[in-house]
Amino acid sequence: MALKLLQFPPLEPAARSLERLQHEVRAASSVVHPNIVPVLDLGLAEGVPFIEMELIKGPSLRERVEREGPFDPARACRLCAQALEGLGAVHARGIVHGDVKPANVLLDTDGAARLTDFGISRLLGESTTVSGTERVVGSPHFMAPEQWRGGHVRPAADLYAAGLLLYYSLTGQLPYGHQPRLALMYKHLHEPLLEPGECPPLIPEYLAEVIRRAVEKQPRARFANAAEFAAAVEMFLSSPFGPP
């Protein structure tokens, strides 16, 4: 098993934080799916709350890419499709991840993608400073425009982040590169990740179009749900423009 130690927001009473977290843990533990790391229990040891999860004996997607470089298109598509299957399962239960990023995608001993930390960042108030005291919840390089605006996080935000995961897996580069947070906010709000007609050498043209749709600035312009996104990715694996 793996234990994740938790630190609640300083201004929120511990009892209220525990109550909110217990609700999330119950919801997450009700979803059983091969592409999700099971949440087993919430505990308290010497006043420190922790979440008990299945131990995945493999690196995160971030660790794997940092160590060995980007994936080939077929492998990147399979991992993205697996992550989307996991997202679809939790979305169907009314759960939104809210912090999909390479560090939260673990690769098990079979090399399959396993999503972890559903909703934990939002419940614990983990956030990034935008300017002054303004704070938004999420990881700057993988946050949807509506998250930067502080809006309600819906499944479309997870699909946006999944599109960025596919980009990261194919290129080994963070979306929009290493930029100050205010610059990242501007780019996520206003600048396309891939300009129309632009196709980086490591991204096949078809997948570039898939990524563009996934990271549309307006949520309604993205894929309707995780299943539709996964189908578009899987089409690459079985079509003439993809690998055999």
Image: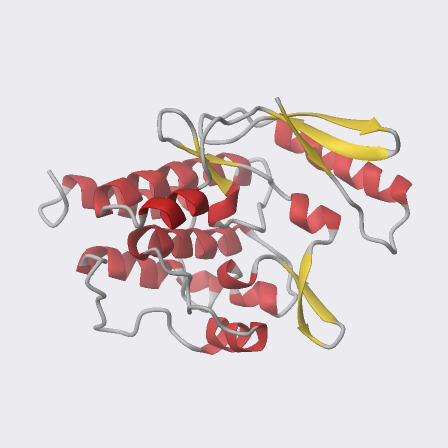
Quarter of the figure with the N terminus: top right
Q: What residue is drawn where x is 11% and y is 50%? A: 241
Q: Residue at x 70, y 37 (%)?
A: 24
Q: Image quadrant of residue 173?
A: bottom left
Image height of 111 relative to 9, above or below: above
Q: Residue furthest front?
A: 67
Expressed as whole percent of the image width and height from the top left, the position of residue 195 reads: 29, 74
The x, y position of residue 134, in whole percent, is 72, 72
The answer to whether 36 appears left or right of 69 in the picture is right
Q: How is the image coloured?
A: secondary structure
Q: Is residue 18 left or right of residue 96?
A: right
Along the viewing direction, whichever of 36 and 111 lies nearer the viewer:
111
Left or right? Give the position of 161 relative to 136. Answer: left
Residue 20: x and y in percent read: 79, 41
Compare residues 50 and 199 and report the one nearer the observer: 50
Measured from the top left, where is residue 176 in percent x and y? 42, 69
Residue drawn at point x = 88 percent, y = 33 percent = 47
Quadrant where the image shows the C terminus: top left
Residue for point 41% across, 41% down: 84
